Amino acid sequence: MTAPASGFRVLVIEDEAMVAMLLEAMLEDLGHTIAGSAAKIEDAIRLIAETQADAAILDVNLHGKETYPLAEALKARGIPFVFATGYDSSGLREEWRGTKVLQKPFQVKDLSEAVSSLRAVKML
């Protein structure tokens, strides 16, 4: 596991409360800061627009709605992200298949690697 630099702020966009809490706890245990958390698309849109975040973990589906518009908003703001889903990248829309996927269920090691890849993108 790589040690994160302090102050890396991560948005958590996840509609399952237990998964969101687990993600937040794991991120904090890894030394990251939670920039914000949203379970609904409307709240996530506001967070993406108003929050200073270095990266995001984005569930592919929030309450039955695909989150590709949120992915577009993150991309437009230059905020790197990974999709969190129970499927691999083949379950994504074709235009998003190159995006890194954090496959559920995941371990802290998987999350650490995903965030490390986001840090690398942010530094480019």
Image (cartoon, grey):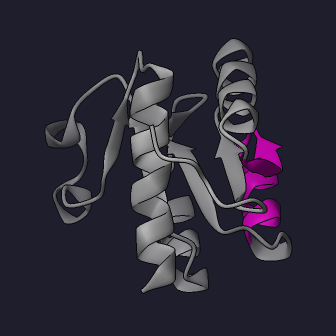
For the image shown, how many numbered marks are present on the structure? Answer: 0
Relative to residue 43, is residue 55 drawn left or right? left
Residue 56: quarter of image: bottom right
Where is residue 60 shown, x and y percent of the image? Answer: 45, 40
Which residue is painted at 39% across and 58% down in the image? Answer: 117
On whether residue 102 falls in the magenta region, the answer is no
- Looking at the image, can residue 68 be seen? no
**Camera-nearest residue between 75 and 34:** 34
Check the image and report above or below for 94 versus 61.
Answer: below
- Looking at the image, can residue 89 be seen? yes
Relative to residue 4, is residue 9 drawn left or right? right
Check the image and report above or below for 21 versus 48.
Answer: above
Check the image and report above or below for 102 versus 20.
Answer: below
Which residue is painted at 20% across and 61% down in the image? Answer: 98
Where is residue 73 shown, x and y percent of the image? Answer: 58, 73
Residue 1: quarter of image: top left
**Camera-nearest residue between 110 and 5:** 5
Name the quadrant of the C terminus. bottom left
Which residue is painted at 20% across and 42% down in the image? Answer: 89
Relative to residue 9, is residue 62 drawn left or right? left
Tell me the magenta residue range. Answer: 32-48
**Camera-nearest residue between 19 and 94:** 19
Where is residue 90 shown, x and y percent of the image? Answer: 14, 40
Which residue is painted at 55% across and 82% down in the image? Answer: 78
Relative to residue 52, is residue 57 drawn left or right? left
On whether residue 35 falls in the magenta region, the answer is yes
